[in-house]
Amino acid sequence: MGVRDATLADLAALIDVQQLGAVRAVGHIFPQDEYPFPREDLRARWAAEIADPGIEAYVVDDDAGAIVGFAALRGDELLHFGTAVETWGTGLAAEVHGDLMRRLAARHVTRARLRVFEENHRARRFYQKLGWLPTGRVSRTSFPPRPLLLEYALDL
């Protein structure tokens, strides 16, 4: 497993990993017949984030060099995070999470934040298992049907 900076050349594989995971994890929030995965919108967002000096965009490569995860950090926020469906339950996500939190701590961040869909129970269990706690702050995603996002925080 290797976490490295994302590049524009990684976009197609990154979006493939994100799409498969999103359909599996939040397909009940975004039914694909009504709210299909916004592939081109997310590709444009990732391209902008990769170019943004205020955002650290990463991909995770397996031993063969295939992209099996992605993440982005902005300030004290875990902005995006996911691993390939075939890696779920292997410990990869916890390993990458640890690496990301060490990167934040090395920048003297003492409290990390993230937002997660209220109805993404798998992700919420994952973060809670790693010590993340809900802050009580809520927002909505910009993607229809605009479900609730819950903010979580983790003291580093």
Image (cartoon, grey):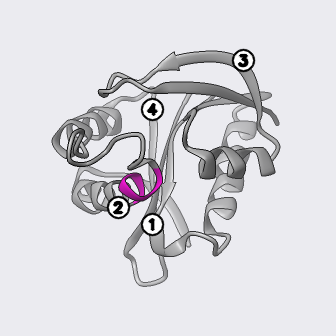
| Magenta segment boundaries in residue numbering | 21-25
Crowding at dot 4, Cα within 10 Å, few <14 / some 14-19 / many 20+, comes out as: some
Seen in the picture, residue 148 relative to 117 is either above or below; the reply is above
Rendering coords of residue 138 (x, y %): 59, 17
Please tell me in which quadrant of the rendered image residue 18 appears: bottom left
Mark 3 lies on residue: 136
The outermost residue toward the bottom is 64
Q: Residue at x 50, y 54 (%)?
A: 82
CA gap between label 2 and label 3 equals 29 Å
Q: Amino acid at mark 2?
A: Leu
Tell me which label, 1 or 4, sits earlier in the chain: 4
Rendering coords of residue 92 (x, y %): 62, 68
CA gap between label 1 and label 4 equals 22 Å
Q: Nearer the viewer, residue 116 or 81?
A: 116
Locate residue 35 relative to residue 81 in the image: left or right.
left
Mark 4 lies on residue: 55
Locate residue 51 relative to residue 29 in the image: left or right.
left
Label 3: element kind: strand
Mark 2 lies on residue: 20
Q: Main secondary structure of the magenta part?
A: helix
Crowding at dot 2, Cα within 10 Å, few <14 / some 14-19 / many 20+, comes out as: some
Q: Are marks 2 and 1 in contact (CB under 8 Å)?
A: yes
Tell me which label, 4 or 2, sits earlier in the chain: 2
Q: Amino acid at mark 4?
A: Ile
Looking at the image, is mark 4 or mark 3 nearer the viewer? 3
Tell me which label, 2 or 3, sits earlier in the chain: 2
CA gap between label 4 and label 2 equals 24 Å
Looking at the image, is mark 3 or mark 1 nearer the viewer? 3
Confirm whether the magenta stretch covers residue 23.
Answer: yes
